[in-house]
Image (cartoon, helix red, strand yellow):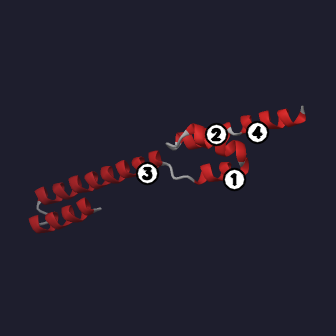
Amino acid sequence: MEFILTLAIAAGLAFIPANIAKKKGKSFGLWWFYGWMLFIVALIHSLLLPDPNAQAAQSVQNTASSADALVKYKELLDSGVITQEEFDEKKKQLLEN
């Protein structure tokens, strides 16, 4: 009876790394099994997985800041503070990043 209870508790705990991995785009079923067999290892592993959603958000943020900088350089160009060549150089640098 204790053995069955232990297996049931392990199966329940396996949902923790499985849910973490699922949020990071991994297979829930495979990670549940992994967590059931090796809970502590799977938990640590799932926490260390890279989060693709965070990477996408960082990419969007970088694009937005580059666009803001480009608008500011365009305003400087229009007001005559910088030349067309300087603007083109800054634009090229921003678009490469």
Q: Which residue is mark 2?
A: 32
2 and 3 marks in contact (CB < 8 Å): no
Q: Earlier in the sequence, mark 1 or mark 2?
A: 2
Residue under label 1, please give it. Answer: 41
- In the displayed structure, 71 sits above or below 14; it is below
**Disc 2 versus disc 4: distance between alpha carbons?**
10 Å
Q: Nearer the viewer, residue 92 or 72?
A: 92
The secondary element bearing badge 1 is classed as helix
The spot of residue 16 in percent (x, y) is 67, 40
Label 1 amino acid? Val
At label 2, the amino acid type is Trp
Name the kind of residue labelled 3 in the image.
Gln
When the figure is inspected, residue 43 is found, relative to residue 83, above or below; the finding is above
Q: Nearer the viewer, residue 86 or 32?
A: 32
Among numbered discs 2 and 4, the one appearing first in the sequence: 4
Q: Alpha-carbon distance for marks 3 and 1?
A: 24 Å
Q: Position of residue 35 (x, y in %)?
A: 68, 44
